[in-house]
Image (cartoon, rainbow, N blue to C red):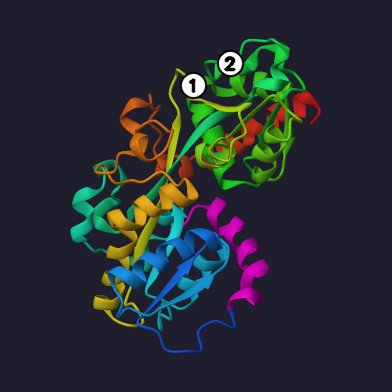
Amino acid sequence: MPSSYFVQRYLAYALGGAALMLGHASHAADAVVYTSNTVQTIDTATDIAQKSAPDLKIQKVTSGTGALMKRIEAEAKNPLGDVVWGAGFGTMAAFKQNFEPYQSPEAKGIDPRFIGPNNLWAGTNAHVMIIMVNDKQLKGAEAPKTWSDLFDPKWKGKLIVGDPATSGSTYDQMYGLYQLFGQDGFNKLVANADISKSSAQIYKSVANGEYALGITMEYAAYAYIAGGQKEVRIVYPSEGAFVAPEAVAVIKNPKNGAASAHALYDVLLSKAVQEAELEQNFRRPTRSDIDVAKLTKLPNLQDIKVEATDPMKAAAEYETVIGAWKKATDAAGK
């Protein structure tokens, strides 16, 4: 059963996203994908699909992750989708009763840590959580090398972070920090940081020079580096970066049958799609046969120290972590 966190949060998302979704399932398709990904990310994959599986007609239904999960749950007796794509592993675990296992031939190229239990899902890309730095705003100070360096009072007012109660990516970041440093770490971090309700505001604010530092996702920071913004760089903290994969899964009893669902699933896991997503959208692949460092200026995952976190455990401990965060923000008057 979903944790209370997922139920409360996703019911709110579903109410906000229902109007967006209702007009979509009117024309025939060989495969219907429910996805919360960006237009650019979706278009990159479907462009590849047109070449690698030209007979596969793909219909896209887009909305927030929570709204899509509630829709899949509501349609359980008469599914209208085939595949869901873009949710984090913790979300997938909370709604696992709505998916059916599939061992894709493409899975042999996926790093085993990015395969879900009993082949219920597989990772299509992995977000690496990092420190984004604007060198111009350091004003001569040495950039942090560790997560714990962010606790130094010299960064007060120069650091921006998200709110784990309103952002899934921020929750992944703060769960990792809580795992490493506990309540004391939250207290020190919040004392220094400005907190944004929008995760997108983090990387935009650092890129714009409003802050020297921000905790964000690798791909978001790298977009500015790839765009030629020389003052922006990425720090992979020496304690270990946190990795949060996103998944694809076959919806139980898919509308257009298993063959169509499996064909689309295979495309989304394919090397061609994951390479294109990396080169065009900077989404780090979950495949171990893609040389990220050769295609970009990013390091390969095996060359990054990673602090392991369990997304299922992170979901189960949501109330504890958010409670600790609220205690820190209350103490700091934020």
Counting residues from the start of the chain, the first of labels 2 and 1 encountered is: 2
Closer to the camera in the image, 274 or 111: 274
Toward the viewer: 56 or 91?
56
| Labelled disc at residue 237 | 1
* Quadrant of res 216: top right
Q: Quadrant of residue 220?
A: top right
Quadrant location of the C terminus in the rendered image: top right
SS category of the residue bearing label 2: loop
Q: Which residues are magenta?
A: 1-21
Residue 21 in percent (x, y) is at 58, 76
* Secondary structure mainly formed by the magenta segment: helix
The residue lying at 22 percent from left, 57 percent from top is: 106
Kind of residue at badge 2: Pro
Residue 202, placed above or below residue 287: above
- Tell which of 284 and 66 is nearer to you: 284
Residue 94 appears left or right of 14: left
Q: Residue at x 54, y 81 (%)?
A: 24
Along the line of sight, the residue nearer the viewer: 312 or 45: 45
User: In this figure, what is the number of numbered marks?
Assistant: 2
Quadrant in which the N terminus appears: bottom left
Q: CA distance from mark 2 to mark 1?
A: 8 Å
Expressed as whole percent of the image width and height from the top left, the position of residue 239 reads 45, 19
Please rate how many residues cluster around mark 2, counting C-alpha atoms within 10 Å: few if below 14, some from 14 to 19, many from 20.
many
Q: Residue furthest bottom?
A: 27
**Is residue 89 at all visible to an observer of this figure?**
no
Q: Is residue 38 magenta?
A: no
**Residue 14 part of the magenta segment:** yes
Give the SS element for disc 1. Answer: loop
Q: Do the residues under discs 2 and 1 have CB atoms within 8 angstroms?
A: yes
| Residue 144, numbered label | 2
Type of amino acid under label 1: Pro
Can residue 253 be seen from the camera position used here?
Answer: yes
